């Protein structure tokens, strides 16, 4: 356990917490992070890093070279965007932008990586290069792909890339990681059933009824995971929206009804099976009821798969900071999605979770109106990044 490093980082915590709370008070959704990106760039320049702005529109990359010999380079990535949620925390630094808030802790992620940049700029006793990657638009707006399309790894070469995310409910200062599939592919789907519609109160026999069809389809969906996916594999299909008809005319059977939801999986074969079976069920049931079906299945992300070697390095770095007993290197896979997965498809690397604590506001789940990042976690996140650099770029 590195008590000396943690003590030094706790001394930095008030300054970093002020930065975090400022970002929290001024949230920006994906591909609109002009203020946040400007703040990040200004801080990195102030601390002497080489700074490149506008990578993938609002991405920022800070480059820092160690004072010791070394050719190896690693990337450390944090996300900057907020969510379209009305904040209900009542905090003095609550969102000043109605309808937008940092409900996933990206304000904390950005701050912890900034803290690592500040500390390492003052302690360059490592060999090689660190690329501090501040990514826009993680929340479904394609930020990782935008930075990659803008030549991220060609312009800022790295041998490995790492990500970090906060985890409410995990004890403060604990870490969790696993090799292999760790987070799911966050797919979305939409099924539209079309029939004739008609007078449901008087002559339903003269019409084709999409409402009964959608009920049968939703029930049938539940068999995809239970009967078409191997029990040892994991998958989730959920219905999130149903729209059809009018409460002003409840005697009318609608001619069209839409059903939408999400699908999560870790393996390409499982993903393919879910899409195939969803189409088969929708089209087959529609034909049975004399209706038609249109199916849209959107593969919005890709499974996040940690590389074994880098997972070991990441776990070792966390253990060097907080002790082996505080690091779970066989954590359960998470069904949430994360577009850092696209970076891991291009470069070896690993994604880590950092505990936020199990009490107070931090016990609220991610993506909720009352969530707030725990500022007491800042030294642990900064310490992890610093420890990781020490592990990856340590002197021979």
Image: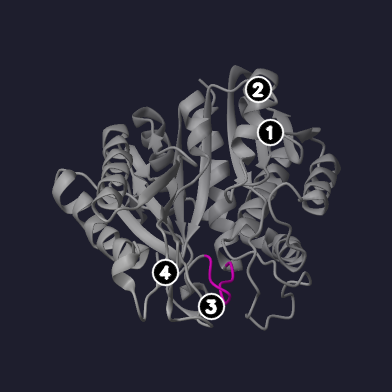
Residue at the disc numbered 4: 198
Quick one: 206 or 305, which is closer to the camera? 206
Query: Sequence-wise, which precedes: disc 3 or disc 2?
Result: 2
Can you give x and y, in whole percent of width and height, for residue 385 in the image? 56, 43
Q: Any mark on residue 124, and which?
A: 1
Side of 207 relative to 362 (left or right): left
- Point out the stretch of residues depicted in magenta: 367-373
Query: Sequence-wise, which precedes: disc 4 or disc 3?
Result: 4
Secondary structure, mark 4, is strand
Q: Closer to us: mark 3 or mark 2?
A: 3
Query: Which residue is depicted at the point 85% across and 44% down?
Result: 46
Q: Quick check: marks 2 and 1 in contact, CB under 8 Å?
A: yes
- Regarding residue 332, the answer to whether it shows in the image is no
* Alpha-carbon span between mark 4 and mark 3: 51 Å
Secondary structure, mark 3, is helix
* Alpha-carbon span between mark 2 and mark 1: 8 Å
């Amino acid at each position: 356990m590195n008590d000396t490093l943690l003590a030094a980082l706790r001394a930095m915590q008030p300054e970093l917490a002020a930065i975090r709370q400022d970002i929290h008070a001024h949230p920006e959704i994906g591909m609109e992070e002009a203020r946040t990106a400007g703040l990040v760039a200004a801080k990195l320049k102030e601390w002497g890093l080489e700074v490149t702005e506008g990578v993938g529109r609002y991405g920022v990359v800070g480059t820092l070279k160690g004072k010791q010999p070394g050719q190896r380079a690693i990337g450390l990535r944090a996300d900057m965007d907020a969510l379209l949620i009305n904040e209900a925390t009542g905090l003095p630094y609550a969102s000043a932008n109605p309808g937008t808030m940092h409900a996933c802790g990206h304000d904390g992620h950005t701050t912890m990586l900034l803290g690592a940049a500040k500390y390492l700029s003052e302690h360059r006793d490592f060999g090689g290069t660190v690329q501090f990657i501040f990514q826009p638009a993680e929340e479904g707006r394609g930020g990782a792909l935008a930075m990659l399309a803008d030549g991220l790894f060609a312009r800022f070469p790295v041998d490995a890339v790492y990500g970090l995310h906060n985890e409410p409910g995990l004890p403060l200062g604990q870490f969790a990681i696993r090799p292999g599939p760790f987070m799911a592919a966050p797919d979305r789907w939409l099924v539209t059933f079309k029939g004739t519609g008609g007078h449901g109160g008087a002559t339903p026999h003269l019409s084709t009824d999409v409402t009964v069809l959608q009920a049968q389809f939703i029930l049938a969906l539940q068999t995809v995971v239970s009967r078409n996916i191997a029990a040892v594999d994991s998958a989730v299909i959920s219905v999130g929206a149903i729209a059809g008809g009018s409460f002003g005319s409840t005697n009318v059977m609608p001619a069209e009804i839409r059903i939408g939801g999400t699908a999560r999986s870790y393996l390409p074969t499982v993903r393919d099976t879910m899409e195939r079976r969803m189409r088969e069920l929708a089209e087959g049931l529609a034909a049975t009821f004399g209706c038609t079906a249109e199916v849209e299945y959107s593969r919005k992300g890709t499974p996040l798969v940690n590389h074994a070697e880098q997972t070991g390095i990441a776990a070792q770095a966390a253990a060097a900071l907080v002790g082996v007993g505080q690091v779970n290197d066989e954590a359960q896979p998470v069904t949430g999605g994360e577009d850092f997965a696209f970076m891991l498809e291009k470069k070896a690397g690993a994604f880590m979770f950092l505990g936020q604590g199990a009490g107070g506001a931090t016990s609220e789940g991610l993506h909720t109106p009352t969530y707030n990042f725990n500022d007491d976690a800042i030294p642990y996140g900064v310490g992890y990044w610093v420890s990781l650099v020490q592990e990856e770029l340590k002197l021979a």
